Image (cartoon, coloured by chain):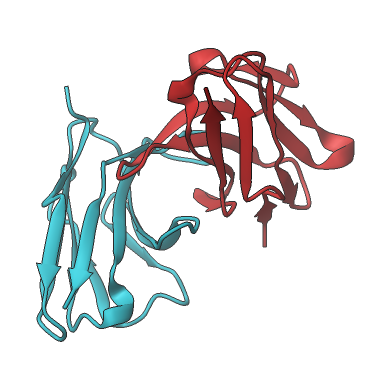
Chain colours: A cyan, B red
Amino acid sequence: DAMVIQNPRYQVTQFGKPVTLSCSQTLNHNVMYWYQQKSSQAPKLLFHYYDKDFNNEADTPDNFQSRRPNTSFCFLDIRSPGLGDAAMYLCATSRAGDSDEQYFGPGTRLTVT
Amino acid sequence: AQSVTQPDIHITVSEGASLELRCNYSYGATPYLFWYVQSPGQGLQLLLKYFSGDTLVQGIKGFEAEFKRSQSSFNLRKPSVHWSDAAEYFCAVAVAGKSTFGDGTTLTVKP
């Protein structure tokens, strides 16, 4: 029944060691989003894909990259994680357009040691 | 650019009491408005949404929200809170396919 799946749920990485978080969806939605959420804060949009079109937020650090090889999957790559990158990373999908709500995955909690 | 303000960082209510969570937005026109709920360690779940039409919208789990254009507000209400409603609540506006979230209100429910 799971619609937006994120793996792993918990990820521990070392300072500077590249890490990849994955998201998959069974909803066949056009749009996929990656958010960073730090404790007691609002989710912050990092980037989103509309189909294959990549849209980066202006303030997303270059350290963060994303790939969407097909409709179902989307990856978040953190090239050189810093301590400040420790957060919950949320993947979400929507059909398209403003009027569609977003469906969120359970998130991946990233710890940087 | 649009923005969302949730004035209350933390609210505590007794089980069975009524609840109102405040949300104010800033945008030149009427945006699409949403309320999401997030339980600890989980993703966000949609409670309800407003696009147009009737300004009082019903959602899941007994929640409702009222859009007031004159006040740029979209407050969330529930007549009788249950212990399972304890969570973080986020108001969001969507413009041009992107959502902006408020900083959230943490709801604590006292027995």
Residue nearer the viewer, B80 or A78: B80
Percent of width and height locating residue A52: 26, 55
The N terminus of chain A - image quarter: top left
The C terminus of chain A - image quarter: bottom left
Q: Residue at x 81, y 42 (%)?
A: B72
Residue nearer the viewer, A23 or B102: B102
Percent of width and height locating residue B89: 53, 39
- Quadrant in the rendering for residue A82: bottom left
Percent of width and height locating residue A39: 41, 60
Q: Residue at x 59, y 52 (%)?
A: B102
Q: Report whether B62 appears left or right of A74.
A: right
Specify whether residue A83 is in view: yes
Q: Report whether B106 appears left or right of B28.
A: left
Residue nearer the viewer, B65 or B89: B89
- Quadrant in the rendering for residue A89: bottom left
Specify whether residue B50 is in view: no
**How many marks are shown on the rendered structure?**
0
- Quadrant in the rendering for residue B107: top right
In the rendered image of this protein, does residue B16 appear above or below residue B42?
Answer: above
Q: Residue at x 54, y 29 (%)?
A: B109
Residue found at the very far front of the displayed protein:
B111
In the rendered image of this protein, does residue B18 appear above or below residue A86?
Answer: above
In the rendered image of this protein, does residue A6 appear above or below residue B17?
Answer: below
Residue found at the very far right of the displayed protein:
B70
